[in-house]
């Protein structure tokens, strides 16, 4: 069951699509929707021991507060037509605190909606920090909307990237409320022979049976990679099948206390063209 949803807000077209997707889900599930914007203080003053121009720091902070309020205003206006329970707020913090702050907020809701970091935007690093914080420090699923936007035509077809791991199992469990709304669900297994201990004698059969008990009829596709890496095999299947949702586990590793994405997760996040629900 989904009872509360968090969506990150910016004054951008992609953020508006994020809000729309979150509001539609909140409407279907009767869930409470929380819009969250960040007003970021410059971390440079802290890094350099406060020797920079204080007035310049204040001016920058005022600008981020105004941008955050603009994002809140767009959210408040955009959700009026959905007739759902909503609230919105601004969190003030430094850029260094961003991942910690989003993680705190995301721990207290059922699902968080975020934008895919765009390679063409100056805030790509900040968006990656938000994703890392929400994915790896919350125990909650994250619904990521592509920066190119969502398709106008909804086919209601989901693909589960299933590798038999606990992360995949977590993602499937978190996605069940969404999968129950789908017309079609596909369990995609890439090179099942390479993970026989994870898949059992009949790859995909056990998870498909589990989904069916939740009222979700899922077909199983065993896809050879044919020399491609796993991530591109998944992306090609998504494109060829016309699916409009990908469900998968999120992988990462720690490096000098910094969380970084694993190879498959990173490629999917960089090249995704449909929304992705990820869990860690």
Image (spheres, helix red, strand yellow):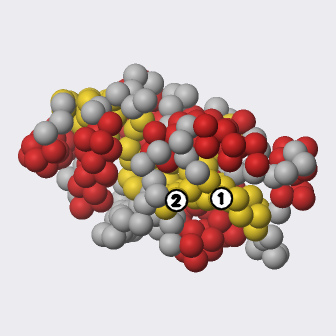
Q: Quadrant of the C terminus?
A: top right
Q: Position of residue 128 (x, y in %)?
A: 48, 49
Q: Residue at x 75, y 43 (%)?
A: 206
Q: Position of residue 188 (x, y in %)?
A: 68, 59
Q: Nearer the viewer, residue 216 or 191?
A: 216
Q: Is residue 39 left or right of residue 175?
A: left
Q: Is residue 240 left or right of residue 197?
A: left
Q: Position of residue 207 (x, y in %)?
A: 70, 43
Q: Residue at x 42, y 48 (%)?
A: 181
Q: Residue at x 62, y 53 (%)?
A: 218
Circle 2 residue: 184
Q: Can residue 45 be seen in this snapshot?
A: no
First in sequence, mark 2 or 1: give its number: 2
Q: Nearer the viewer, residue 170 or 10?
A: 170
Q: Is residue 70 left or right of residue 279?
A: left
* Few, some or many residues within 10 Å of mark 2 (<14, 14–19, 20+): some
Q: Position of residue 56 (x, y in %)?
A: 20, 42
Quadrant housing residue 99: top left
* Few, some or many residues within 10 Å of mark 1 (<14, 14–19, 20+): some
Label at residue 219: 1
Q: Is residue 10 left or right of residue 205?
A: left
Label at residue 41: none
- Say if 274 sits above or below 77 in the image: below
Quadrant housing residue 60: top left
Label 2 with label 1: CB-CB less than 8 Å = yes
How far apart marks 2 and 1 lie (CA) works out to: 8 Å
């Amino acid at each position: 069951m989904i009872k509360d949803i968090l969506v990150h807000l910016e004054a951008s077209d992609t953020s508006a699509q994020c809000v729309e997707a979150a509001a539609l889900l909140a409407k279907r599930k009767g869930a409470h929707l929380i819009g969250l914007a960040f007003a970021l203080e410059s971390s440079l003053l802290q890094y350099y021991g406060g020797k920079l121009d204080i007035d310049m720091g204040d001016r920058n902070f005022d600008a981020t507060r105004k941008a955050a309020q603009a994002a809140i205003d767009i959210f408040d206006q955009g959700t009026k037509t959905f007739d759902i329970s909503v609230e919105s707020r601004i969190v003030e913090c430094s850029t260094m605190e961003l991942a910690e702050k989003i993680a705190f907020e995301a721990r207290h809701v059922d699902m968080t909606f975020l934008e895919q970091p765009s390679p063409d935007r100056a805030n790509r690093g900040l968006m990656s920090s938000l994703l890392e914080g929400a994915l790896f420090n919350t125990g909650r699923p994250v619904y990521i909307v592509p920066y190119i936007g969502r398709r106008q035509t909804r086919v209601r077809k989901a693909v589960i990237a299933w590798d038999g791991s606990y992360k995949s199992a977590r993602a499937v469990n978190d996605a069940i409320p969404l999968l129950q709304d789908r017309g079609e669900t596909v369990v995609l297994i890439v090179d099942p022979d390479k993970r026989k201990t994870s898949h059992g004698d009949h790859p995909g059969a056990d998870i498909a049976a589990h989904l069916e008990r939740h009222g979700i009829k899922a077909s199983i596709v065993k896809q050879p990679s044919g020399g491609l890496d796993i991530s591109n095999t998944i992306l090609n299947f998504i494109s060829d099948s016309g699916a409009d949702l990908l469900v998968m586990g999120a992988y990462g590793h720690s490096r000098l206390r910094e969380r970084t994405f694993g190879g498959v997760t990173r490629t999917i996040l960089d090249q995704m063209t449909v929304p992705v629900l990820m869990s860690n």
